[in-house]
Image (cartoon, coloured by chain):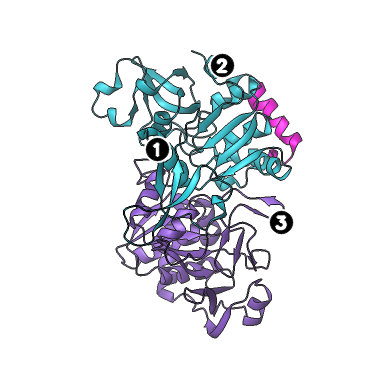
Chain colours: A cyan, B purple
Amino acid sequence: MPVDTLVDHIPDGAFIALPPDYSLPAMEAVRALIRAKRKNLRLLGVPVLGLSADLLIGAGCVAEVHSSAVSLGEAGLAPRFSEAVERGEIKVVDYTCPAVHTALQATEKGVPFMPLRGVIGSDLTRDRSDWQIAQNPFATGKDPILLISALVPDVALFHARWGDEAGNVWVGRRRELATIAHAARNTYVTVEELRPGDMLEDELLAPGVISSTYISGVARAERGAWPLGVADVYGIDDAHLTAYAAAAKTREGFQRYLDEHVWQATKNSLPA
Amino acid sequence: MAGNEELLACVIARLVADAHHVAVGAASPIPATACELLRAKGHPLRVTRLHKRKGNPFTEGSRELFDLAGQGRIDYFFLGGAQIDGEANINLVRAEGRRFPGSFGSALMYFTCRTILFREEHSRRVLVPKVEFISAPGWSAPEVRRPGGPVALLTGKALFAWQKEKRRFRLESVHPGHTVDEVRESTGFMFDVERAGETPAPTSEELALLRSTVASEIAADYPEFAARVWR
């Protein structure tokens, strides 16, 4: 199915789990969400976000960001995120990385909460009905520990190296994507390439596979992570990220970026 | 003559010299340099660079770092802050109306690893009396399990040691070219001063290693930094 059809399954207001820039972001699908003028999305960064979130926020698709951070890494602050927060245009629920993983691992296991060390005394714990500090029931002395409620994303969206005829996808070592897929109600994946057969029958490929059990839809998107990378296929386009970080400092510059790389045909993502 | 980056790397190398396993974040070329210097000196140190693009050690995704830390398998970690206060609280979220990226893994890592607070900018804007938001607290009540926590605060001007019992920094040494008065002037919180000397300059052996073995190792992951410091 085409990428634009895949994102039809992601409605306005969806709570959508996204990977960081270094872990197979589905950038072509993100551009398709912007073209589809999606509204009020609630983003969950697993555990942080970068360019995908900055684009969606700048394009007005986002109501809430739940994440441990939003940053362009070496390219600096995420300009559309920072401005939207400073102007009060979006709601932010601040996490710390392991709390996101823990919340999704609880869902993956079908349990209502999981404990996490640390965090106690951080302002992150303020005003949160989904986190609670409790006494470790197995300790003999006082031992407060943070309990984190299970978190269920409506949708997980990411990119993968391969999809196969059996509906499986291969993400290799990016196993946090398996956790997102296990926890989300629906998982949509763009893939670099489609291959024949069933990857689960290949012992070398199987450990990097997410089984079709968890996958709701797959769309082919060659260079679908661009300007981010897919290991051993294409690297991160650092020059593009630097240029984006500079352009997106102003709303006008950001609009010009959208005109050139999002509203125009997807050919911009293919190598020159 | 040693560059400031080389001096800071040598200070960090001394601080973490007893480590077996150090994790280093993406934007941390100076801590990474310190760890490579220790390895070049023959320390059997494991260095986990979190965002290593080729040959990254993690195969369970980024959560593996926090699982390692939670088990106590990482000895030292490095944290910075948009603001750091005199009780070693760090703020990575917001300051003076500006939004910063966020707390990342600090609220676990600061509890589980011995932590070097590292921020090159030494100013009253960064080193404040009280942070506006606590991403991770500098100290915890005795009943809270906390095998890790602050060890030292290193800036471009000085090195402070953390005094856990007093919950207060003590000025350890001032880098060459700076003075105790200047450090006082540019620090927004109170700290102890007992016998602060000058931060020792890198030895000729350290400089030789930094400019050969270490420089080529660092260039692979931090090309811009290596080109700037060792061109």
Between marks 1 and 3, how big is the CA–CA gap?
A: 36 Å
Between A63 and A55, the one nearer to me in the picture: A63
B52 with respect to B46 (left or right): right
- Residue B13 in percent (x, y) is at 42, 68
Q: Residue at the bottom extreme?
A: B195
Q: Position of residue A11 (x, y in %)?
A: 58, 20
Residue B96 marker: 3
Does A39 appear in magenta? no
Q: Which residue is under mark 1? A: A106
Percent x, y of residue B98? 69, 51
Helix, strand or loop at label 2? It is helix
**Element on which disc 3 rests:** loop
Residue placed at 37% from the left, 32% from the top? A110
- Say which of marks 1 and 3 sits in front: 1
Q: Is residue A71 visible?
A: no
Q: Are marks 1 and 3 on the same chain?
A: no
Q: Range of the magenta residues?
A: A246-264
Q: Chain of mark 3?
A: B
As measured in the structure, the alpha-carbon distance from the residue carrying label 2 to the one carrying label 1 is: 28 Å
Q: Residues within 10 Å of mark 1 (few under 14, many from 20)?
A: many
In space, the residues marked 3 and 2 are separated at their CA atoms by 41 Å
Q: Which residue is mark 2?
A: A8
- The chain identifier of the residue carrying mark 2 reads A
